[in-house]
Image (tube, helix red, strand yellow):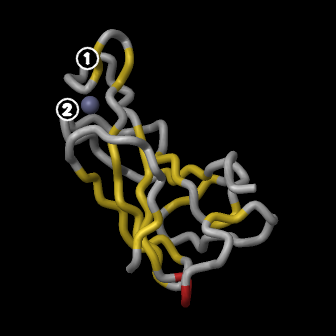
Amino acid sequence: MNTVGFNTLYHALKCPYCGSAVDSGIGFRAGALKQASYRMGDKLSWEGGNCRPEEKPAGGNFKTIGYYNCDNLNCTSWHDCFPEVQEAIITFTDDVIVEVQSIQHPAREQGFDILPP
Ligand SMILES: [Zn+2]
């Protein structure tokens, strides 16, 4: 079953709209999905049964899309009391989190995409 669970990456990311630090973390769905907390440089765990994708990408090299919200209530990304969901690409090399980049494009379905390296 790959339908539930996620992990959170805590990284010194700045909101692209207001420049505030993002404290809430970036939710992503890769590796063992067990509500684990990660930081840049950490190695992704595949122990725990509920993994996404089920087969670990070759060499642990891949990218995935994660999602975060700005925590600043006065940010322009907030509309009607809800923050717009923002996206970041997380890059793994040999399962280690080596890069996090905020990306901006029109809103779309949250697919937690797994991408080739
Ligand atoms: Zn913001």
> Which quarter holds ligand 1?
top left
Query: Mark 2–mark 1 contact, CB under 8 Å?
Result: yes
Mark 2 packing: few (<14 Cα in 10 Å), some, or many (20+)? few
Which residue type does callout 1 highlight? Asn
Q: Earlier in the sequence, mark 2 or mark 1?
A: 2
Whole-percent x and y of residue 3? Answer: 67, 48
Q: Is mark 2 within 8 Å of ligand 1?
A: yes
Within the image, what quadrant is residue 79 found in? top left
What residue did someone put label 2 on?
18
**Cα distance in 3D space between marks 2 and 1:** 9 Å
Q: Is residue 93 above or below residue 36?
A: below
The kind of secondary structure element at disc 1 is loop
87 or 113, which is in the foreground? 113
Q: Residue at x 57, y 55 (%)?
A: 29
What residue did someone put label 1 on?
74
Whole-percent x and y of residue 8? Answer: 56, 50
Task: Locate the N terminus by quadrant.
Answer: bottom right
Which residue type does callout 2 highlight? Cys
Is residue 30 left or right of 92 when viewed as pictured? Answer: right
Is residue 78 left or right of 114 when viewed as pictured? Answer: left
Q: Residue at x 39, y 34 (%)?
A: 69
Q: How many marks?
A: 2
Q: Residue at x 21, y 38 (%)?
A: 19
Whole-percent x and y of residue 89? Answer: 36, 60
Mark 1 packing: few (<14 Cα in 10 Å), some, or many (20+)? few
